[in-house]
Image (spheres, grey):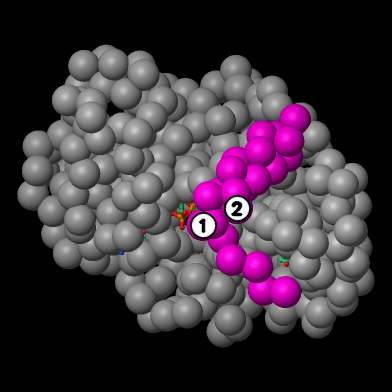
Amino acid sequence: MSLDRSKRILVTGGAGFIGSFLCEELLKLGYEVVCADNFFTGSKRNVEHLLNSHSFEILRHDVCMPLYIEVDGIYNLACPASPIHYQFDPVQTTKTSVVGAINMLGLAKRLHIPILQASTSEVYGDPVEHPQTEGYWGNVNPIGIRSCYDEGKRCAETLFFDYKRQHDLNIKVVRIFNTYGPRMHPRDGRVVSNFVVQALLNEPITFYGDGMQTRSFCYVEDLVHGLISMMMTAPSFTGPVNLGNPQELTIGKLAQLVIRLTNSKSKIVSKPLPSDDPRQRKPDISLAAEVLSWKPAIEIEEGLKRTISYFEKLISKGNVVSHN
Ligand code: NAD
Ligand code: UDP
């Protein structure tokens, strides 16, 4: 079964950064949307512009608890994504990924509906294969400070594939690479939001390690189009599929770019590299290109300009306080 328009879709984690864009896009496409979120890292502010739509509903719900509703498809995004948030209560992070996946898979099984899992490039850990293809099994520390997230997401993937094998569920697994854009939490510690907020407030730009580690940054709207395309594919295509922007840059280059685009007076300060911080990351997106006809359209400079403009407005409204 693939999804017709005018169906009701559940988005867990729908009040978060990516979830809020996904809810918005699904509404635009004519779906009814139920957003379920416990507001741990998301907020009602992210979806307040959707609240006057008759097709949008919001539930305060923790995916670690079962959910009994009637829907036609599920996007399972509930999980804190920034290291400081997922490390704040690591046991809860693992529970959210694993118990949350079991509950949402149970719902999908009862209703015989498709379910998409927002997995992550973190399943590749600190990769020794570069760029990362879906066939690479990863290099993950099972007992480190990132493991609650990495291993939680890996176990969730296992559960998805076991539900497919055991119950013939229509599953879709997407491995999302670093995504950025408006509505990131301004102080959630992720590199793009950190650098942009620091640059706009002329605070020191916090540079972890030597700045030579790489990431590949995808603008949120590109990512959301990929998620929806994946959900629309035939049940025989389960993934996992990488979604991300293969334009790789060092964190040092990113800092320079943000400083230039904001005309900031910020100085760079060096901080220790957190443990298990991957040295390099870049998606191979040939599978997404072939099966979903998907590739990102928004270049890093354009995406950063849109992100900067969002944070400028937030700062001018007094919603972000300077640490200076
Ligand atoms: P986010 O923290 O902004 O959003 C996560 C949302 O899930 C928040 O609204 C939060 O309140 C909610 N949530 C957390 N625990 C919950 C629970 N137990 N029950 C219900 N809701 C819960 O993060 P994001 O960047 O929007 O990420 C969304 C998804 O995409 C996550 O699953 C994340 O692992 C995945 N992902 C994101 C990135 C990225 O770069 N942004 C990369 C890889 C994977
Ligand atoms: N980083 C940094 N300064 C910051 C925040 C992050 O140098 O203020 C680095 C971090 O060490 C990592 C990269 O930027 O190498 C991306 O970090 P982020 O937390 O955004 O994503 P992830 O490490 O989960 O890919």
Residue 2 in sight here = no
- Nearest the camera: 185 or 105? 185
Would residue 289 be visible to someone looking at this image? yes
CB atoms of marks 2 and 1 within 8 Å: yes
Tell me residue 87's x, y (percent). 51, 77
Does mark 1's beta carbon lie closer than 8 Å to ligand 1? no
In this rendering, position of residue 75 left or right of residue 306:
left
174 in magenta: no
For the N terminus, which image quadrant? top left
- Which one is in front, 113 or 158? 113
In front of the other: 229 or 80: 80
Q: Please tell me which residue is depicted at 63% across the width and 77% down the height of the picture.
A: 141
Say the numbered circle drawn on residue 60: none
Amino acid of disc 2? Ile
In the image, ligand 1 is in what quadrant?
A: bottom left
Residue visible at 9% across and 43% down? 69
The C terminus - image quarter = bottom right
Seen in the image, is 200 located left or right of residue 235?
right
What is the quadrant of residue 293 in the picture?
top right
Q: Is 307 inside the magenta-drawn segment?
A: yes
CA gap between label 2 and label 1 equals 6 Å
Image position of 113 with respect to 67: above or below: above
Highlighted magenta segment, given as a residue range: 302-324
Majority secondary structure in the magenta region? helix
- Provide the secondary structure element on which disc 2 rests: helix
Name the residue at 18% across, 49% down: 59
Question: Disc number at residue 319?
Answer: 1
| Residue where numbered disc 2 is placed | 315
What kind of residue is marked 1? Asn
* Depicted 261 relative to depicted 157: above or below: above
Q: Is residue 95 left or right of residue 83?
A: left
- Residue drawn at (23%, 29%), measured in percent from left and top? 52
